[in-house]
Amino acid sequence: MTVIPDDELEFRFFRSGGPGGQNVNKVSTAVQLRFDALNSPSLTDAVRERLMKAAGSRLTLDGVILITAVRFRTQERNRADALERLQGLIDKASVAPVRRIATRPTRASKERRLQAKSGRSNVKANRGRPDLD
C-alpha cells in the first residue's frame, strides 16, 4: 500500500451548490484535492502509469489528478472523502494485473460443445411443419 505524504497534496475549498439553506451560501465546504501524479516521488513508474490510466477524466493534461468532494455538509468530512477516494485509486493501481495464462480446451469440453451444437441443430430442424409423406 502506497502512502502519499501530505506535502504532495493540495486542497482547495469552495462553496458547494445544491440544497442546504444559508449554510451553503456562507461556508466553503466543498473540497478539490489536487495530486501531481506525474511528478510524485512517492510512486513507482508502474504504479504511476496504472494510476494515471485509472484516473480517467479526473486526470489533467499536466498529469494532475483532481478529485472534487461535495457529498457532505462539512469541510472535514469532504476532505476525508477526497483523501479516501484518492487512496482507493492508488490502492487499485498498486496491484499489478495478473497475466492470463493461455490454456487449451480439454477433449471432453470440445465434445460437450459439439453435442450441444448438434442438439440445437436437431431442435431447429424439427421446428417446421411435419411431412405428410
Image (tube, grey):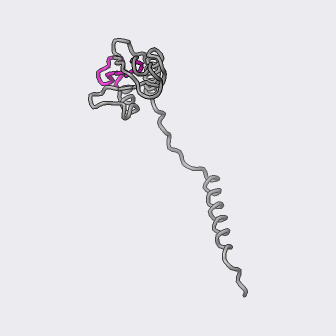
Relative image position of residue 38 (x, y in whole percent): 30, 25
Q: Residue, x 43% and y 27% (percent of image)?
A: 93
Placement of 103 over or under 115, stated as above or below? above
Looking at the image, residue 20 sits to the left or right of residue 8; the answer is right
Residue 78 drawn at (x, y percent):
45, 19
* Nearer to the camera, 72 or 107: 72
For residue 117, what is the image quadrant?
A: bottom right
Give left or right: position of 61 versus 42. Answer: left
Q: Nearer the viewer, residue 68 or 26?
A: 26
Q: In the picture, which quadrant includes the C terminus?
A: bottom right
Q: Is residue 33 magenta?
A: yes
Answer above or below: position of 99 versus 13.
below
Q: Position of residue 62 (x, y in %)?
A: 26, 28
Quarter of the view holding residue 7: top left
Tally of numbered discs: 0
Evaluate whether residue 87 shows in this view: no
Quick one: which residue is furthest to the right in this view? Answer: 132
Q: Where does the magenta region start and end?
A: 28-45
Which residue occupies the foreground of this view, 50 or 33? Answer: 33
Give residue 37's position: percent from left, percent from top. Answer: 33, 23
- Report whether 114 appears left or right of 57: right
